Amino acid sequence: MQIPLLVFLCSILLPLGMFLFYREVLDNRKNGSVLYFTVGMISVVGIVWFFIEKEMFYLSLVNPLLSLLVYRSMFSIFEKRFGKAPVDTAFRWSPGLFYDRLFNILFIVLGILAPILLSLFFIDLFRN
């Protein structure tokens, strides 16, 4: 397997894995600075790698930072609107969780798809 393709897949799976399995880390505000620092360093490594090796897939290491920013902004909007943190709705069939389910579905779409499309835009921009 090619290393750039592996990097691209990891950049997609890191935010998705954090959202699905370690959501309490994302919701905890005390871990915010550590999480931003870690994801920021991953992004910087990807940008530096891009300028050293001229391989476009390394720009996809910015995806986790973009996904984190999307999650934090969606989380803040949800918290202000409903006065509570969104609940993980996987395998919970109790009524009254419509907006929590909507939050989860929107994050899966926006938090994963939007950074990929944005990184593909940057790849196309730098390629020309």
Image (cartoon, rainbow, N blue to C red):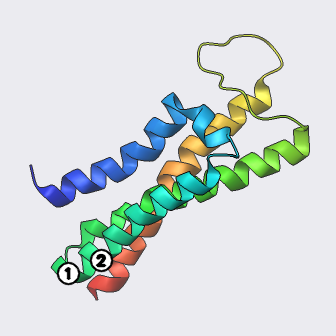
Most foreground residue, 115 or 46: 46
Q: Is residue 110 left or right of residue 6?
A: right
Residue 113 versus residue 20 in the image, above or below: below
Residue 16: x and y, percent? 46, 40
Give the crowd class for mark 2: few <14, some 14-19, many >=20 residues within 10 Å.
some
Q: Is residue 74 left or right of residue 21?
A: right
Residue 91 versus residue 17 in the image, above or below: above
Number of marks in the image?
Answer: 2
Location of the C terminus by quadrant is bottom left
Residue 123: x and y, percent? 33, 75
Snapshot quadrant of residue 98 = top right
Q: Pointer 2 and pointer 1: residues touching (CB < 8 Å)?
A: yes
Residue 42 visible to the viewer: yes
For this orientation, the residue located farthest to the bottom is 128
Give me the residue at 35% from left, 63% from top: 60
Most foreground residue, 12 or 33: 33
Q: CA distance from mark 2 to mark 1?
A: 6 Å
Residue 97: x and y, percent? 78, 22
Q: Is residue 31 left or right of residue 63?
A: right
Snapshot quadrant of residue 26 = top right
Residue 115 visible to the viewer: no
Residue 106 versus residue 114 in the image, above or below: above
Most foreground residue, 41 or 121: 41
- What amino acid is at disc 2? Val
**Residue picked out by circle 1:** 52
Helix, strand or loop at label 2? It is helix
- What amino acid is at disc 1? Ile
**Residue picked out by circle 2:** 48
For this orientation, the residue located farthest to the left is 1
